[in-house]
Amino acid sequence: MSSDAFFSPAQLVGYVAFAIGVYSFLQKDDRRLRATIGAQAFSYAVHFLLLGSVAAAAASLVTAVRALVSLYTRAAVVAALILATNIALGFLIATELAGWLPVVASCAGTVAFFFFDGIALRLILLGATACWLTNNLILGSIGGTLLELFLGAVNVTTTYRLFREERARKARKSG
């Protein structure tokens, strides 16, 4: 990749998405976390459009809307509507198998945020991260690849800490 490619408009927007994504996961307040994830997903959508991936851009827009809607509700019917929208857009836009990676990632994120918590939530999100990471590698997204590697590392670390805490709690109860 030439040095010009590192500073193309598409990559610069990807770096912004990376910065917002890192900032979002530093938030302790859930409402601020969801709001900043919405902003990060919107910037991701612009980034993917500039890279020429309409499927990834559409999935990112659905993710942005999901993050903002989840500020107000976690109703199952809302989750179903978001999932249906994502899948319909996938059928309309994804022209190859790789185009389904962001759709699957966004759907997994929706299921995770609306129906799970704790370790299960994080494991589902780790699967979504793997899909986004693969998508970003295929598209040549530098900021997106860095973001998903960062999120994956943070998620694995947090999941491990939760697992250890749960195991210690069970050991205290039984012993």
Image (cartoon, grey):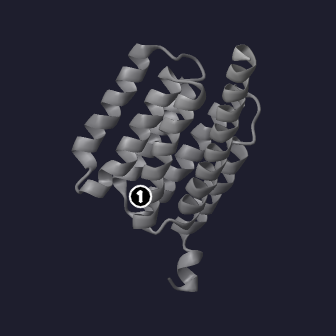
State the image coordinates of residue 106 (x, y, percent, origin top left).
Answer: 43, 39
Would you call the spot at circle 1 few (<14 residues within 10 Å), some (14-19), or many (20 or more)? many
Q: Is residue 56 left or right of residue 70?
A: left
Q: How many marks?
A: 1
Q: Is 99 above or below relative to 163?
A: below
State the image coordinates of residue 19 (x, y, percent, origin top left).
Answer: 68, 55
Q: Is 9 above or below relative to 157?
A: below
Q: Quadrant of residue 117?
A: top right
Residue found at x 54% / y 16%: 73
State the image coordinates of residue 156 (x, y, percent, origin top left).
Answer: 61, 46
SS of the residue at dot 1?
Answer: helix
Q: Is 128 above or below relative to 48?
A: above
Residue found at x 75% / y 28%: 29
Give, as a three-letter code, the residue at label 1. Asn
Residue found at x 58% / y 76%: 6
State the image coordinates of residue 145 (x, y, percent, origin top left).
Answer: 54, 61
The one nearer the camera, 142 or 171, is 171
Q: Is residue 56 left or right of residue 71?
A: left
Q: Quadrant of the C terminus?
A: top right
Q: Is residue 75 left or right of residue 99?
A: right
The one nearer the camera, 49 or 18, is 18
Q: Is residue 51 left or right of residue 119?
A: left
The one nearer the camera, 86 or 49, is 86
Q: Which residue is mark 1?
A: 135
Q: In the displayed orientation, state which residue is furthest to the front.
A: 175
